[in-house]
Amino acid sequence: MDALVAFAAALLALRLAGNLARRWRRTRRPELACWAWSLAAYAVAAAAIAWGEAAGWDARAFRVYYAAGALLTAPLLGCGSLLLAGVGRAKATALLVVGLGVGVALSMPVHGGFAAHGIPAAQDQLAFLPARLLAILANALGTLAVVAVALRTLRARPAGNVLIILGVAAAATGSGLAGLGAAGTALGIAAGAALLYAGFVAPRSLPGSLRKTAATVFTRS
């Protein structure tokens, strides 16, 4: 059952990544490309969960899961948000993040045994340096960039930015649902991907009376 839930989450995230890629081809907005790659990494992480749950976890499945889920998704989200805010250097940062993340994932020593089911804990499989430290920094800085840009531009994109923040929260909540095992993480990936996508494609401003109401609320506050 966990493998099926994870596979469904992977298909959903991949479909949404494809939709963002199509939007990027039409508009050439760089943040859409970065967000598309982020959701694609999210899809790979969910697919690795399905692989591990269906065939039994081993170093290969764990390495793919850790690379996509722990090293790439959040920092690419953050780079996309920085590009939306007009930080041109975020393009080079995104390339650096991908290269460093893939390089560390390929070279990191994986030790310890694997249970047949349940996502392996990073502290049981990896040394703190460099992989775990890099994952901590990448996720912290990427999430900080997403939330900071969303809050900074909240008046311009209230609906979209709230959805983005909820998407980040859903992903974090899913990762913390240890009681639900791999299915909990997969559900968090599915919910997070859907909310993030909705936030990315939301209009920059609210239409009609909703815009007036939002402006009134912010003015009074």
Image: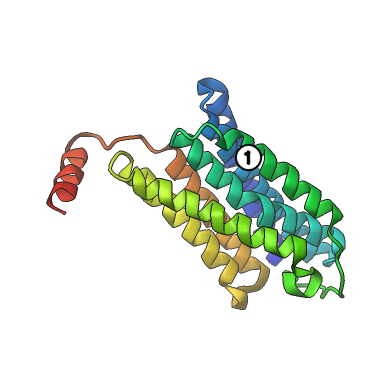
- For image coordinates 36% across by 50% down, the residue present is 151
Query: Helix, strand, or loop for circle 1?
Result: helix
The image position of residue 130, as x and y in percent, is: 76, 61
The total of numbered circles placed on residues is 1
The image position of residue 98, as x and y in percent, is: 70, 43
Q: Nearer the viewer, residue 108 or 159?
A: 108
- For image coordinates 74% across by 42% down, the residue present is 99
Q: Nearer the viewer, residue 105 or 56?
A: 105
Quadrant into which the C terminus falls: bottom left
Report the amino acid beneath label 1: Ala
Q: Residue pushed farthest bottom?
A: 179
- For image coordinates 45% across by 33% down, the residue present is 86
Residue pointed to by mark 1 = 94
Q: Residues within 10 Å of mark 1 (few under 14, many from 20)?
A: many
The image position of residue 142, as x and y in percent, is: 55, 52
Residue 168 versus residue 154 in the image, above or below: below
Res. 29 visible in picture:
yes
Image quadrant in which you'd find residue 38: top right
- For image coordinates 12% across by 51% down, the residue present is 220
130 to the left or right of 58: left
149 to the left or right of 56: left
Q: Nearer the viewer, residue 61 or 78?
A: 78
